[in-house]
Amino acid sequence: MEPHHSPLVTHAGLQHAVLLRAMPVLRHDLSSPLSVMRMGTTLLKRHLQRADLNPADAVARVEQLEQQLTELSAHIRRLRQWDPQVRERHSLKAIALEAAALARPMLMVQGMEVAPLQEDAPGWQDDSQAPHTLLYAVLAAIYHLAEPGEGEAAPASIVVEPLSSHGIQISAQGARSVPDALQIAAPSLDGLALTADAVAQLARSAQFAASVSGRSTVTLTPLQGR
């Protein structure tokens, strides 16, 4: 008899699959400010030891460190959006912007573009909000479209845009034309494919419905009566 897997374990596995894809960018966002701060403190220490830094320049260097610390704190706060136990709501535009920012770097090195969001598009209404966990579904939709099945062509670009005033549409456009030699292969994620069913399940957990049209379009709209 095959082991039974509860919906909770299955859902956690889907969230893990999304997080694994975003992890390189999250790791870079945290490590980059730390590296700059470490270099800055080393230089400041050397100048102070040699007593060749005037007070005004010392203050300027400390202010730079404060700015970098503020940036690092902001990245740490962003980690809350991955915690399913947190109960927060964000505008659809904020969720879409975050998803595009997280997906863009890794897809870019694979020869695909995530088009910049049109932040002034009329469909982005600040009062159209969703649970912060909708981020999982938007990212899953992006990765679903960007990771074609065997024999299918990868898209040239992914576009994230508003759908009326209460939904999000993610579309794959064109066909990737970047030579294989110029691409960096995606990390192996065998057994962690983000299928149409996976996108739908992650959307449902955020009280949204996902309509998946092959490898071309995914729409996310609020469930009726939520």
Image: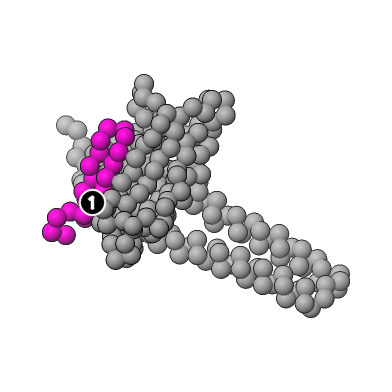
Q: Is residue 73 above or below residue 157?
A: below
Q: Indicate whether residue 220 is drawn in magenta.
A: yes
Q: How is the image coloured?
A: one colour
Residue lying at 50% horizontally and 48% vertically, measured from the top left: 25
**Magenta span of residues:** 204-226
Residue lying at 54% horizontally and 33% vertically, measured from the top left: 184
Instruction: Locate the C terminus and report the quarter of the image it occupies.
Output: bottom left
Q: Which residue is mark 1?
A: 221
Q: Is residue 180 above or below residue 172?
A: above
- Alpha-carbon neighbours of circle 1 within 10 Å: few (<14), some, or many (≥20)? some
Instruction: Locate the N terminus and report the quarter of the image it occupies.
Output: top left
Question: Residue 86, how many percent across, how many down?
Answer: 32, 64
**Front position in the image: 146 or 36:** 146
Residue type pointed to by label 1: Thr
Question: Residue 172, how many percent across, how many down?
Answer: 37, 36
Q: Indicate whether residue 36 is drawn in magenta.
A: no
**Front position in the image: 3 or 121:** 121
Residue lying at 42% horizontally and 52% vertically, measured from the top left: 118
